[in-house]
């Protein structure tokens, strides 16, 4: 059981670290700038980004606030689960105008129909 918890923590640390680093870079911030915004030293941010240390829940909230993203995005990873994928699509669609949303839905519908047809016709 302990090794399972360590593996989970390690995986979460890597996902979290990659998401922190990606967002920080998108904002064109250095590790030092992020560290200052959340009240830690630069080495702590480096450890978070490498996944070697997991921040506390309080620090996670500060990170999300500083990085200007919802908390769930810090721990989100690509997921094969339909519910997770639907949530991501819903988020993307919410940023579009009604006309663009309709276009995106029609395009996605055609793409899915094409891929479903290709999957049925290809030999296993």
Image (cartoon, rainbow, N blue to C red):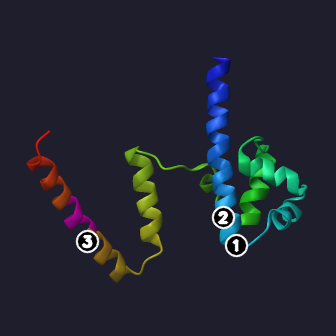
In this rendering, which labeled residue sits more in front, label 2 or label 3? Answer: 2
**Earlier sequence position, callout 3 versus callout 1:** 1
What secondary structure is found at the residue carrying circle 2? helix
What secondary structure is found at the residue carrying circle 3? helix
Viewer-closest of 36 and 96: 36
Residue under the image location 80 percent in, 62 percent down: 31
- Residue range highlighted in magenta: 108-112
Instruction: Give the label on residue 23, or none.
Output: 2
Q: Residues within 10 Å of mark 1 (few under 14, many from 20)?
A: few
The Cα atoms of the two marked residues, 2 and 3, are separated by: 29 Å
Q: Position of residue 86 (x, y in %)?
A: 40, 54
CB atoms of marks 1 and 2 within 8 Å: yes
What secondary structure is found at the residue carrying circle 1? loop
**Residue where numbered disc 3 is placed:** 107
In the rendered structure, does residue 62 fall within the stretch colored magenta?
A: no
Q: Position of residue 47 (x, y in %)?
A: 79, 47
Viewer-closest of 50 and 96: 50
The Cα atoms of the two marked residues, 3 and 1, are separated by: 31 Å
């Amino acid at each position: 059981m302990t090794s399972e918890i360590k593996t989970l923590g390690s995986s979460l640390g890597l996902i979290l670290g990659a998401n922190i680093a990606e967002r920080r870079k998108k904002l064109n911030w250095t590790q030092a700038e992020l560290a200052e915004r959340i009240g830690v030293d630069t080495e702590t941010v480096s450890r978070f980004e490498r996944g070697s240390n997991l921040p506390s829940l309080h620090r996670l909230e500060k990170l999300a606030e500083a990085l200007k993203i919802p908390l769930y995005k810090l721990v989100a990873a690509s997921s094969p689960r339909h519910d997770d994928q639907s949530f991501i699509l819903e988020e993307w669609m919410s940023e579009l105008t009604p006309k663009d949303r309709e276009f995106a839905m029609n395009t996605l519908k055609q793409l899915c129909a094409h891929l479903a047809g290709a999957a049925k016709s290809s030999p296993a």
